[in-house]
């Protein structure tokens, strides 16, 4: 956890923006019987991020969240009361795993609100979808106004099928494997990923793709990340090793040619007060302006280089702003 926070600070210095979140883990990270001690350690780490001088000096906002135990676990209430109650001002979100229904979301929100001071903005909630039942309820889950992001939990989803989905669906197949039943091709897994992404886009939430466990094969990782972004509509992706961060950023950031075109279209549109324009034989109007503005936003959020004319559109995120 400490190394992740150090890396986040280093990347912020390099890119001038917080290009990835850090989610401190209380679910798998806490030893059995040591849940409260682990939660208190997380409190200390989270509160320490408020005092990071490199962030304050540049007016940058760090995004640090925490994954607590699921709502059915004995330590759920204690996790939330301890961490949100003592470190809520420094948290960007709380993540709850194994969410099965809208009722689980409501229970999580109630616990967060009970632990949080009434004077601060309501804490955003991130949820993990990890079972067939959760997939069947994902549009309802995404509809809750406090849900900010939904992640797909691949490993638990596969194992929840009782062996009906092969282990190959938890990985990424190479051409030499001779099988196409990996996480991007098994029909049940692919359908679940698409449901999560569709529900998020229907309700304006952030879809976050699952991990790729091939830690050291950065080519496999980057191809997988690009597929998640381009073919499945995901806008974020989990990493499980420091070596995965840069390939993910490259894959989820727009290509340089896209950024250049977006900057040209937005500049021309602005000059015409957002009336329709023709550029290189193509018509552009407010629908395409919205798309190309989103391209520039993605470039900014992933630290991708932008033309000088577009750099003035963005400024550092105010410290402690929730988003």
Image (spheres, rainbow, N blue to C red):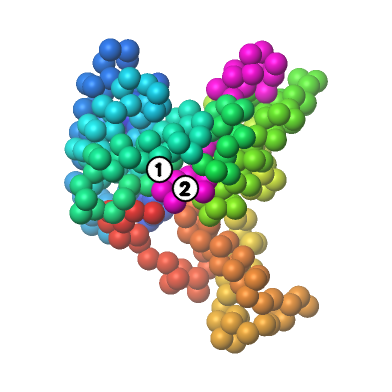
- The residue at the point 33 percent across, 26 percent down is 76
Say which quarter of the image contains residue 169. Answer: top right
Secondary structure beneath dot 2 equals loop
Q: Is residue 93 magenta-colored?
A: no
Secondary structure beneath dot 1 equals strand
Mark 1 vs 2, N-terminal side? 1
Write down the residue under mark 2: 144
Is residue 287 rendered to the left or right of residue 39?
A: right
Q: Is residue 3 above or below residue 205?
A: above
Instruction: Look at the image and give the residue range highlighted in magenta.
Output: 142-169
Mark 1 neighbour density, 10 Å: few (under 14) some (14–19) many (20 or more): many
Foreground label between 1 and 2: 2
Image quadrant holding the N terminus, namely top left
Kindly indicate whether the residue at mark 2 contacts the one at mark 1 (C-beta within 8 angstroms).
yes
Mark 2 neighbour density, 10 Å: few (under 14) some (14–19) many (20 or more): some
Looking at the rendered structure, which numbered label has been put on residue 125? 1
Nearer the observer, 250 or 142: 142
- The residue at the point 40 percent across, 43 percent down is 125
Q: How many marks?
A: 2
User: Residue 160, percent across and down?
Assistant: 59, 19
- The residue at the point 24 percent across, 33 percent down is 81
Q: Is residue 153 magenta-colored?
A: yes
User: Residue 195, percent across and down?
Assistant: 64, 40
The CA span between labels 1 and 2 is: 10 Å
- The residue at the point 43 percent across, 72 percent down is 312
Is residue 212 rendered to the left or right of residue 177?
A: left
Can residue 311 be spotted in the picture? Answer: yes
Q: Is residue 1 above or below residue 168?
A: below
User: Which residue is outermost to the bottom?
Assistant: 272
């Amino acid at each position: 956890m400490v190394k992740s926070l150090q890396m986040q600070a280093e990347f912020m210095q390099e890119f001038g923006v917080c290009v990835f979140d850090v989610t401190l883990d209380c679910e798998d990270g806490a030893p059995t019987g040591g849940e409260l001690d682990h939660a208190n350690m997380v409190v200390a780490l989270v509160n320490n991020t408020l005092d990071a001088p490199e962030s304050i000096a540049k007016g940058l906002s760090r995004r640090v969240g925490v994954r607590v135990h699921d709502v059915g676990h004995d330590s759920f209430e204690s996790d939330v009361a301890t961490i949100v109650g003592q470190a809520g001002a420094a948290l960007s979100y709380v993540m709850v795993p194994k969410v099965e229904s809208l009722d689980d979301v409501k229970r999580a929100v109630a616990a967060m609100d009970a632990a949080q001071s009434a004077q601060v903005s309501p804490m955003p909630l991130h949820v993990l979808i990890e079972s067939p039942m959760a997939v069947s309820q994902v549009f309802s889950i995404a509809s809750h106004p406090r849900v900010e992001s939904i992640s797909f939990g691949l490993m638990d989803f596969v194992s929840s099928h009782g062996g009906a989905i092969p282990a190959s669906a938890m990985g990424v197949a190479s051409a030499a494997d001779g099988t196409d039943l990996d996480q991007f091709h098994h029909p049940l897994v692919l359908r679940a990923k698409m449901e999560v992404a569709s529900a998020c886009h229907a309700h304006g939430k952030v879809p976050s793709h699952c991990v790729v466990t091939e830690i050291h094969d950065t080519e496999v990782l980057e191809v997988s990340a690009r597929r998640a972004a381009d073919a499945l509509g995901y806008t974020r992706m989990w990493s499980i090793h420091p070596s995965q961060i840069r390939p993910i950023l490259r894959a989820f950031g727009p290509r340089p040619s896209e950024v250049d075109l977006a900057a040209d279209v937005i500049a021309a549109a602005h000059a015409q007060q957002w009336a329709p324009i023709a550029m290189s034989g193509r018509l552009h109007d407010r629908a395409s302006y919205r798309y190309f503005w989103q391209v520039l936003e993605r470039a900014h959020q992933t630290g991708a280089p932008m033309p000088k004319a577009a750099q003035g559109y963005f400024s550092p995120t105010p410290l402690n702003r929730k988003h």
